[in-house]
Image (cartoon, rainbow, N blue to C red):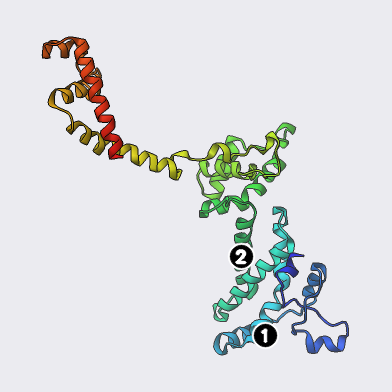
Amino acid sequence: MSLQNQNLATAIALPACPQEATALSWGLLPPLGNLDAYITAVNRMPLLTPAEEQQLARDLRDHNQVEAAGRLVMSHLRLVVSISRQYLGYGLPHGDLIQEGNLGLMKAVKRFDPDQGVRLVSYAMHWIKAEIHEYILKNWRMVKVATTKAQRKLFFNLRSMKQGFKADALDEASTHRDTLSDAEVSLMAKRLNVKREDVLEMEMRLSGGDVLMDPSPQDDSDKAFGPIAYLSDAQHEPTAMLEAQQHDRLASDGLAMALEGLDARSRRIVEERWLKVNDDGSGGMTLHDLAAEYGVSAERIRQIEVAAMKKMKTALAEFA
């Protein structure tokens, strides 16, 4: 069991002998072996009177007495068990919920101020629930579903409020409906003081499930095709990034160097034919336009262009 695996070494066990119970009621005994025995023992722990609680809290605060802290913690372990039962619907082990609640209880005892005029039970409830909430949010799904304060509030209230809407529904169709209506979304957002968009997003998160990104390599069927096959980002793959950097370098520094190796006529022919773009989106001069300017045939311009491109190709290969 998870409670044993995490080793709540301070699990409480009362002796069967009544004479020993008084002497060892606050003692720490070995783990009990199962969760039911732990809960039974916790429920048999004696409660503190207000005066005893005040005195123990002052002994801990003023004199740092560990024994006083232990008695305060153990007398409230039944509170942790009671609160943890409220969160069994999230599918997490009850023993783990109790363990996390016990951590919250210990934090509450450490910070409790007996002069504030409140009982420890009221003060500790906040810390116990906070630790249990944090544990549920971290372990309910592989991907964390709530990060902001509004999302956390929605996570722990959405399901209960939806059940309340179903209970209040008069027609059978509404009772069996799983999604929220626009009116229910607005009402929930108003009650929890959050945005409508936050309500819709949290409902979508809670209704979805975890998807295995990379299926088992032992599965050779078509079902082994997982999201990782089509969600990969090829643009940021190292080889692709190096190739893109090399291409950009050739397109700038390499091309400029290759053009400088041509004579003036060849460079102008290449620029007009391949590099020039007019404002209207059209290209540069045609073979016939260049032929007319230089007083040669269009075929001669084509030959000069081919020779220039070969020379540039050789220069770019050396540059790379």
The residue labelled by disc 2 is: 131
Contact flag, marks 1 and 2 (Cβ < 8 Å): no
SS state under label 1: helix
Q: Nearer the viewer, mark 1 or mark 2?
A: 2
Residue 90 shows in this picture: yes
Q: Is residue 309 positioned above or below 232 on the image?
A: above
Residue type, numbered disc 1: Glu
Q: Give x and y (percent) for residue 109.
A: 61, 77
Identify which residue, 29 or 309, lies in the foreground: 309
Separation of disc 1 and disc 2 at Cα?
Answer: 26 Å
Q: Is residue 120 positioned above or below 160 on the image?
A: below
Residue at (60, 71) in percent of width and height: 123
Name which of mark 1 and mark 2 comes first in the sequence.
1
Residue 50 shows in this picture: no
Can you tell which quarter of the image residue 121 is in?
A: bottom right
184 sits to left or right of 288: right
Q: Give x and y (percent) for residue 44.
A: 80, 76
Residue type, numbered disc 2: Glu
| Crowd tier of the residue under label 1, counting other residues whose Cα lies within 10 Å: few below 14, some 14–19, many 20 or above | some
Q: Give x and y (percent) for residue 72.
A: 66, 80
Identify which residue, 86 or 319, lies in the foreground: 319
Can you tell which quarter of the image residue 118 is in?
A: bottom right
Q: Which mark is residue 101?
A: none
Q: Which part of the image, by quadrant, shows the C terminus? A: top left
Q: Which mark is residue 52?
A: 1
Q: Give x and y (percent) for residue 306.
A: 25, 20
Residue at (58, 37) in percent of width and height: 183
Q: Which part of the image, by quadrant, shows the N terminus? A: bottom right
